[in-house]
């Protein structure tokens, strides 16, 4: 590359094994002097790469993806002013440096964080941010200034705590006026609810733009999980698509009582899902809660086109799955066009 003439705007480097990174340091320095805009650096898990000082002089950077890197900017670093996309996978970085990097990237539109090491707190101040995908461990994620956020995914976002600053579900989404796609998993639901069963029926501000809701690894027989799911659905009047993947445990923190399950339909007497068109439910085993939930969605969705149900195959007999099918087919449907696909042994019924 020493004989290259002209700018290098895009470069990808993926290393599986290397004795030392001296040549990489030289390469990064070379790229910093030649107008690099789109950079991907991937290193092995057992030998992360410490970014050299020259990396922080790549002031024309627009798209940046780092995997197994150590990020320790000099005190003079003022951020990448033109950065629009940032992906950090298993990097070593402090909460303070991460927050500063994000807040100084005023044009940032896409942010992906996959960080398993525990962070204290992440503050997201990004006025242009449209998509945020987080997987990892953190005590608190503060999303205060994200006025145009469209897509949000929080996976394993943290553990519920009674400490000050813990998010309150009913108010957490108040500033997400443009949110269209939301994905939460079990740990994130527990985190946002602070592990409490005292869940409001609706959010303080409705999610009027939300079109797609995905909940994965949910224990529907757990009070917190069910109440949060129902709260989000009630609070999303223009919801078009629901995807849920259920999980199971013999040890639930707050198992549902029969009375609570039977009251599920009554909690939706003033709610109609007028825009819901598709539903996908994975891991159905036929619990009373699941059956009531399916009944509710069919009864309250006049525009529903398709409901796909994939039963839990492991440890469930064919007889059990057929019983569930027989019960579901009896339910009234608000939509005359609703098609229910129930799969037995990967075959549609």
Image (cartoon, grey):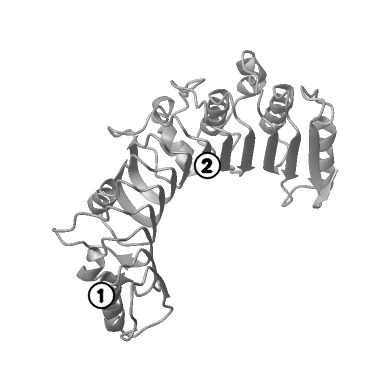
Checking the image for residue 29, the label placed there is 1
Q: Which class describes the residues within 10 Å of circle 1: few (<14), some (14-19), or many (20+)?
A: some
Q: Quadrant of the C terminus?
A: top right
Q: Position of residue 150 (x, y in %)?
A: 47, 39
As measured in the structure, the alpha-carbon distance from the residue carrying label 1 to the one carrying label 2 is 39 Å
Q: Position of residue 59 (x, y in %)?
A: 26, 61
Towards the viewer: 301 or 244: 301
Please identify the quarter of the rendering in which residue 50 is found. bottom left
- When the figure is inspected, residue 207 is found, relative to residue 341, above or below; the finding is above
| Residue 300 shown left or right of residue 330 in the figure | left
Would you say residue 324 is visible in this rendering? no
| Residue 203 shown left or right of residue 145 in the figure | right
Q: Which class describes the residues within 10 Å of circle 2: few (<14), some (14-19), or many (20+)?
A: some
Q: Quadrant of the N terminus?
A: bottom left
Q: Residue reaching furthest left?
A: 76
Q: Secondary structure at mark 1?
A: helix
Please identify the quarter of the rendering in which residue 80 is found. bottom left
Residue located at (72% from left, 52% from top): 314
Q: Secondary structure at mark 2?
A: strand
- When the figure is inspected, residue 242 is found, relative to residue 109, above or below; the finding is above
Checking the image for residue 183, the label placed there is 2
Tag nearer the camera, 1 or 2:
1
**Earlier along the polypeptide chain: callout 1 or callout 2?**
1
Mark 1–mark 2 CB contact (< 8 Å): no
Would you say residue 263 is visible in this rendering? yes
Q: How many marks?
A: 2
| Residue 12 shown left or right of residue 76 in the figure | right
Towards the viewer: 73 or 196: 73
Q: Position of residue 47 (x, y in %)?
A: 34, 75
Q: Position of residue 168 (x, y in %)?
A: 38, 28
Residue located at (27% from left, 63% from top): 71
Please identify the quarter of the rendering in which residue 251 is found. top right
């Amino acid at each position: 590359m020493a004989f290259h003439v002209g700018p290098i705007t895009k470069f990808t480097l993926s290393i599986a094994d290397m004795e030392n990174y001296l040549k990489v340091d030289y390469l990064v320095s070379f790229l910093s002097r030649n107008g690099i805009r789109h950079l991907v650096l991937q290193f092995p898990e057992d030998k992360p790469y410490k970014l050299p000082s020259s990396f922080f002089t790549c002031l024309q950077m627009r798209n940046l993806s780092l995997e197994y890197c150590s990020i320790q900017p000099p005190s003079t670093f003022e951020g990448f002013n033109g950065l629009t996309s940032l992906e950090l996978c298993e990097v070593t970085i402090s909460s303070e440096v991460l927050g500063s990097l994000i807040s100084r990237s005023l044009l940032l539109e896409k942010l992906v964080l996959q960080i398993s090491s525990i962070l204290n707190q992440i503050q997201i101040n990004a006025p242009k941010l449209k998509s945020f995908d987080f997987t990892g461990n953190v005590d608190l994620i503060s999303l205060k200034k994200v006025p145009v956020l469209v897509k949000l995914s929080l996976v394993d976002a943290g553990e519920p705590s009674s400490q000050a600053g813990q998010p309150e579900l009913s108010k957490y989404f108040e500033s997400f006026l443009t949110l269209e796609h939301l994905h939460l998993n079990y740990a994130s639901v527990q985190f946002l609810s602070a592990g409490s069963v005292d869940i409001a029926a609706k959010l303080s501000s409705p999610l009027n733009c939300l079109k797609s809701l995905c909940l994965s690894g949910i224990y529907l027989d757990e009070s917190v999980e069910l109440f949060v799911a129902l709260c989000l659905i009630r609070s999303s009047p223009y919801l078009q698509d629901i995807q849920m993947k259920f999980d199971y445990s013999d040890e639930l923190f707050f198992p549902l009582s029969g009375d609570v399950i039977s009251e599920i339909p009554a909690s939706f007497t003033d709610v109609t899902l007028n825009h819901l068109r598709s539903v996908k439910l994975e891991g159905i085993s036929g619990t009373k809660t699941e059956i009531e939930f399916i009944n509710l969605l069919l009864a309250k969705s006049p525009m529903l086109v398709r409901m796909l149900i994939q039963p839990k195959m492991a440890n469930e007999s064919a007889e059990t799955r057929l019983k569930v099918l027989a019960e579901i087919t009896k339910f009234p449907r608000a939509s005359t066009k609703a098609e229910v696909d129930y799969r037995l042994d990967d075959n549609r019924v």
